[in-house]
Amino acid sequence: MTQETILKGLVLSFTGSPFDGTPEEAVVLHEAVALSAGKIAATGAADSLTATYPQASVTDHGEKLILAGFVDAHVHYPQTAMIASWGKRLIDWLNLYTFPEEMKFGSPDYAMDIATRYLDITAAHGTTTMCSFCTIHPESVDAFFLAAKARGQRVVAGKTCMDRNAPDGLRDTARSAYDQSKALLEKWHGTDRISYAITPRFSPTSTPEQLEAMGALWAEHPDCLMQTHLSEQTDEIDWVRSLFPDARDYLDTYEAHGLLGAYGLYGHAIHLEPRERDRLREHGAALIHCPTSNTFIGSGLFDMAGLMAEGQRIGLATDTGGGSSFSMLRTMAAAYEVGQLRGAALHPAQLLWLATVGSARSLRMEDRIGNLTPGMEADLIVLDLASTPAIAQRHEEASQFWEAVFPTIMKGDDRAIAEVWIGGRKVAHQMMG
Ligand code: GUN
Ligand code: ZN
């Protein structure tokens, strides 16, 4: 017989998008959530859930906030060991720090070490699903999926394809990128909680032939996500223009090769032309906002308010290790700060939505993860809203709910993550770093 679990506390569910209408009205708070067989069985009044599930184990989390685990929609797990590398902008940062580290992932042992370390660190920060770039090595994909499978985690990842403008040892070809991606996709996609994403790194490191091959693979597997980078830095955009003189704009380098679609994920998307915005919206493609990366590498300020207002699909992400933090709390804080610099203060309900439902929507997984409603997979976290003395004193003074939550968004870290549940099972503390 299945053993049910009931968690009591401030259980937060979204009933709609806090970007449509009044943000507070998109949220309901329940007294408890019941988990059964890896799914959310019910939310509601504590008495009613304990009456429905009399055999359940019950834990009372008091004033702690219980919500869906964070969904990080764009990361590079292989960059775990070189996060926070000093002093460079995108192209130099890739050449000096990123590519030498990624070179190491031909070793299955090294790849497994870093995949394990990465999943430990992110679990400690309350992230239960992520969409990751790997390296050009198929071994890096196998290691990540094996490590995620052992934890029962819902993850998305793919082999990063590059056939030019990358060092020796870190280039494939149009043909080998297609063949290896296809083999990995057929091996992993849809097994356990694993999804494969077709992953051309970005236009500067792929020849038109490789982009064409990736587009062909995507056409053969339209239920797969496709992830890449778009318009992150102005120098990068100039470079794309010189590499693709016939393209109308950066997005066109993807569009012309079958790499624009509803299941497309475009990381950064900061310096967009009106045509690019129109095409992304028409396709329902997802733009992934990576605010700590955008400030850390000096890329620019994402237009959250404008892009949301025009109806774009938007997710939130750390972009580890161009991003300077593994924490989605820190990432929400950075999104708030970027919003302020653009003159639009994001409401805490909007920030939490972006880190859960918003990212799940961008991954086309909002029917499975990102929210605490019956039938969803039981990936959730318990957030301590008074996790440090500085946050606690601010929390104590709060006169309403959102004022009690916002200091943890702005100042919280892994100390705020009291518990993590993945697929209905509590993550052991040693896995939480
Ligand atoms: N553009 C192409 N590759 C990368 C990467 O690894 N990180 C970031 N931030 N941008 C990229
Ligand atoms: Zn990236």
Image (cartoon, helix red, strand yellow):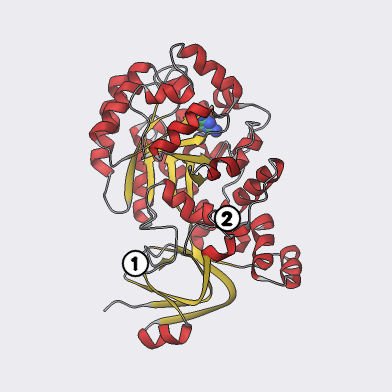
Kind of residue indicated by mark 2: Gln
Image coordinates of residue 16 in percent, x first then y, are 47, 60
Kind of residue indicated by mark 1: Gly
Instruction: Judge from the rendering whether residue 37 lies leftward or rightward of residue 243; answer left or right.
Output: left
Near-viewer residue (96 or 17): 17
Quarter of the image holding residue 259?
top left
The residue that mark 2 highlights is 350
Residue at position x 43%, y 46% in the image: 362
Element assignment for label 1: loop
Q: Residue 166: tell me if it is visible.
A: no
Image coordinates of residue 255 in percent, x first then y, are 38, 25
Query: Residue 375's mark?
Result: 1
- Mark 1 lies within 8 Å of ligand 2 (Cβ measured): no
Near-viewer residue (403 or 34): 403
Quarter of the image holding residue 175?
top left
Near-viewer residue (388 or 71): 71
- Mark 2 lies within 8 Å of ligand 2 (Cβ measured): no
Is 431 situated above or below 322? below
Image coordinates of residue 260 in percent, x first then y, are 38, 31
Residue at position x 36%, y 77% in the image: 4
Instruction: Judge from the rendering whether residue 396 lies leftward or rightward of residue 280; answer left or right.
Output: right
Residue at position x 42%, y 50% in the image: 361
Near-viewer residue (334 or 417): 334
Element assignment for label 2: helix
